[in-house]
Amino acid sequence: MSAPLPAQEQAKAEEQKLSPAELKKRAKAEKQARRAAQKGGQEQDGDVGASATAPNGVNGDSNTTKHDSGATQQQHAQKPKGEKQQKGQQQQKHGRQGAQEVESHHKRTGSQSQPLPIRRRPSQSGAPPVVQKPAPKKINKQVELFSHLYTQPRRQSIEGVSKDIHPAVLALGFQMSSYEICGSSARCVAMLLAFKEAIQAYTTPAGTSLARHLTSHYLSPQIDFLKSCRPISESMGNAIRWLKKLIVEIDPDTSEQDAKDDLCERIDTFIRERITVTDQAIATSACQQIKDGSVVLTYAKSSIVERTILEAHTNGTKFRVIVVDSRPLFEGKSLATSLMHAGLEVEYLPYSAISHAVKQATLVLLGAHSMLSNGRLQSRVGTASVAMQAAKSDIPVIVCCESVKFSGKVALDSIVLNEVAPAEELLLPSQSASAKPAKEDTSEDAEAKPKSLSDWKDIANLQILNLMYDVTPAEYIRMVICEYGSLPPSSVPVVHRLANEGM
Amino acid sequence: MSKRNAVAGGNGGPRTPPFDVVAAYRRLLSEDEDLTMPVAAIEALILALANTPASTVSETLDLVSKLTAQLKRGIPNSISLSAGTDLFQQYLISNLQRPSARGDFDQMRTHLVQNGKLFVERAKAARETIAGFGRHFIRDGNVVLTNGGSRVVGSLLRSAAESSNNRGTIRFKVIYVMSPNNSAEEDESRQNVAALRERDIPVATIPSTAVAYCMDQVTQCFVGAEGVVENGGIVSRMGTYQMGMLAKAAGKPFYVVSESHKFVRLYPLNQQDLGIEQNVVDFRTSVGSVKGESRSVKDEGMEETKGYKSPDFATQDAVDYTPPHLISGIITESGVLLPSAVSEELIKIWF
């Protein structure tokens, strides 16, 4: 009675893969496994199973007469496959019968413990590769799940850069890769300003027109260079899309200098309208939410949040600010400093103190890297937990975000859309070979000689993942403030269409 | 219209600047039982425009915004009427600033004044459309929970009572939440109850304290709204919020019935964020009210309203805010919307 289980197992497997060679292999493996697993009486079954691998109609036919033995059932379970080759109708019938029989037997014998080792066989045979996998990972220090996010390492040197790249863009690229210029809006503005210079330095080659040549042959390499320094943000993407559209629409009759001047002027307008003035409008609108006695909680640093808080302070509102910050960028330090210098009461807390911070807070203000079309917020990694903690304690979470950061993309998790920063940034800075080994190291190298975290590349089974962003679910966000007013997160796609796609 | 103009003209006179828009608003509301606050506000503004000579576009816009501010100051709870004034202002801006409108400004203005009535008529017709949409939500054997004297909910329930499916009229029951004190507010509720009972619909009236008690018998809830705010939540009579919470807890659908002209550009985060002062939570000691210590819900510009406010502005006129996650659907004349669609509608109007 122990036979039906493996038989069904086999039947299932055969449904998936029908090659006879495969079948034979499986049967053999099964035979071995069964021999290894107790019971001398099972030898018989194994033999039958092996014989069944031959897609032999006669063999099957003869067996159909003995309906009661477990061996027959096994045979039948295998049969549909053989039959398909032979197309004997009578056998098909038998085969189905057999399969049903097997199913019913399977139910009855389900409680038996004996077939279990055999049942696990596929996973056992699958196990060795799993064990082997870590070996290549020793070389490959990328986290498998995020492998799609690893681009080439961030460019740190000018080596091999195309000569077409404008110096302003070159400088910007390195400023971005070293976080000298950081933050979605700042990067967008800086990029547009660099492009302005690049456009002024551009001359259309003979035999082509500016509208056709500029984007594909001149601007694209600049953009690619910026991408190689650090993946571009959503706002930069939107701005680039806007700029490309603008270039295509240039009237071919305009002289080159006029066209370039016009482009630069339009870029200035774009920066003013979509970012500078917008920031002011958002700050004015958002600071209405800060009331006397409020305790504003914010995470990391957003220029818009900083502006909002400073504006509320200038308006004479009496409130307190809690800045939560985390490694590795410690962006909140600069926010806390600037607020402190403005005369605000600031509390600076580490990320591990979120729940404590949330207890006192009455309002959470967050900046954004991007607002996704399903209402989710993509922002500095860690934002999601802050928002979750706040939402759980019914504290309003408000996102301040220019519409240029709205995106048509949709993400359900932080895996698909993200940016992986160099893992070295997560290492502790105190690597000066002094007596102070970082505490975190001890857990990693319990086995051998004292390795520190900085040796992570030599430590097997250790990978470091340094994600830049995470995605906050829409239900944690009470309100999104953009230049179009205050919106529920569900209205992000409407505004995105309106603002970025001109519909 | 002409008669009203005459009345209003007697009030202020075409040349005298102070046209009392607040009085006109109040009078309009009291004259017409069926008028909603946003529509009354729009009508009052049109009356004021008709009575005040303004010759340029910017002058007109300036006048309208001044009148709006005056109106908002004059009425203690300006949420609902601001939906109307905002709509009107936006309509003016989009129409007057169109380049083509510039030439025939006067014509445009007279057109506006004359068509005010049409707008009111349409607003009233909307109620019937809503009833048409909404009655399909009520089926045989349902028990409907409702509160307040909302006219649109009343007309929906009446319409459901009169309509029929293929087996005859729909048989449903109504549980009506009424406050025990005989305030004027309850008159409308009583009228609704009487109208339903006349149509052979069994109606039970319960105090608001019994809402949780009867929630297990209820199939769905219908409530009216003073204003539908931007995130899809509603501002409605005190008690609606708790009804929504109880309905959510019991897993019963909670529908809001409202004309789309009640959509208001307001985004409250919580009950204190409505921009109006309600003296609902009033801490007292034996000495008296402890104003200083109680949480201040004052908004800028609200100080002036004190003159107009009756001192016992308490729970009977008070409103609360029901957040969108408690609302299953908003039945409007343009269809049944999810709360999240409100913001889209508003964006369509404003941009």
Image: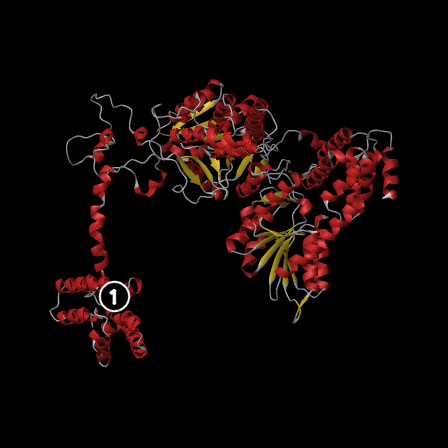
Horizontal and vertical percent position of residue A272? 57, 25
In the rendered structure, the answer to whether residue B124 lies left or right of residue A439 reads right
Residue labelled with disc 1 = A10
Q: Quadrant of the N terminus of chain A?
A: bottom left
Q: Residues within 10 Å of mark 1 (few under 14, many from 20)?
A: many
Residue B83 visible within the image = yes
| Dot 1: chain letter | A
Choose top left, top right, bottom left or bottom right for residue B276. top right
Name the amino acid, label 1: Gln
In the rendered structure, the answer to whether residue A124 lies left or right of residue A198 reads left
Choose top left, top right, bottom left or bottom right for residue A389. top left
Could you say whether the residue bearing mark 1 is in a helix, strand or loop?
A: helix
Horizontal and vertical percent position of residue B317? 67, 43
Residue in the picture at 40% in, 41% down? A414
Q: Quadrant of the C terminus of chain A?
A: top right
- Is A300 situated above or below A108? above
Viewer-proximal residue, B134 or B277? B134
- Is A270 situated above or below A502? above
In the rendered structure, the answer to whether residue B111 lies left or right of residue B340 reads right
Horizontal and vertical percent position of residue A397? 49, 37
Q: Residue furthest bottom?
A: A65
Colour theme? secondary structure
Viewer-proximal residue, B68 or A358? B68
Q: Residue furthest left?
A: A40
Residue B282 visible within the image = no
Viewer-proximal residue, A394 or B190? A394
- Is B173 situated above or below A429? below
Choose top left, top right, bottom left or bottom right for residue B22. top right
Q: Residue furthest front?
A: A207
Horizontal and vertical percent position of residue B320? 61, 43
